């Protein structure tokens, strides 16, 4: 009886360990979300700029996670300028100020 009980307890512990290991592994989408969040945080993006960046970063064909921080920042600022439909001097001014942000 004790041997049977010990076997049941061991099986329960093993099953619990397996489920905890599976919970610790992130899916590809979760990993991408983590990377995009880290990139957005390093650029101190807020509001619409962050939304635009996250949307672009999380797209299936996006390769932002392999880009340098400066490339990511340029892409984010460019997307934000496009969302605001800026052109000419207004776009240049916006891009300059956006790229200078820490």
Image: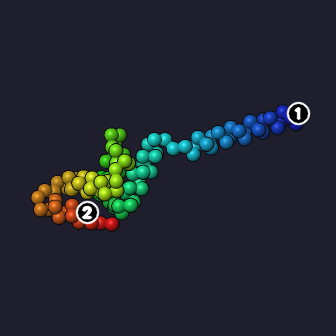
Is the residue 43 above or below the residue 33 in the image? below
Specify the farthest residue to the right.
Answer: 1
Disc 1 residue crowd, few under 14, some 14–19, many 20+, Cα 10 Å? few
Q: Where residue 99 sits in the image (x, y, percent)?
A: 26, 62
Disc 2 residue crowd, few under 14, some 14–19, many 20+, Cα 10 Å? many
Q: Where residue 59 sits in the image (x, y, percent)?
A: 34, 43
Q: Please report the residue visible at 78 percent of the width from the left and 35 percent of the height from the top.
A: 8
Q: Dot 1 corresponds to which residue?
A: 1
The quarter in which the C terminus is drawn is bottom left
Q: Quadrant of residue 13?
A: top right
Q: Please report the residue visible at 82 percent of the width from the left and 38 percent of the height from the top.
A: 6
* Mark 1 → mark 2, Cα distance in angstroms: 71 Å
The circle drawn on residue 98 is 2
Among numbered discs 1 and 2, the one appearing first in the sequence: 1
Left or right: residue 85 versus residue 13 is left
Q: Please report the residue visible at 35 percent of the width from the left and 40 percent of the height from the top.
A: 60
Q: Nearer the viewer, mark 1 or mark 2?
A: 2
Q: Where residue 79 sits in the image (x, y, percent)?
A: 24, 52
Left or right: residue 90 versus residue 61 is left
């Amino acid at each position: 009886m004790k041997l049977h009980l010990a076997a049941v307890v061991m099986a329960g512990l093993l099953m619990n360990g397996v489920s905890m290991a599976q919970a610790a592994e992130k899916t590809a989408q979760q990993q991408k979300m983590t990377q995009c969040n880290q990139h957005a945080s390093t650029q101190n993006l807020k509001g619409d700029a962050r939304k635009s960046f996250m949307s672009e970063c999380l797209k299936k064909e996006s390769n932002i996670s392999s880009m340098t921080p400066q490339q990511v920042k340029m892409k984010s600022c460019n997307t934000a300028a496009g969302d605001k439909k800026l052109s000419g001097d207004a776009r240049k001014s916006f891009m300059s100020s956006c790229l200078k942000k820490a």
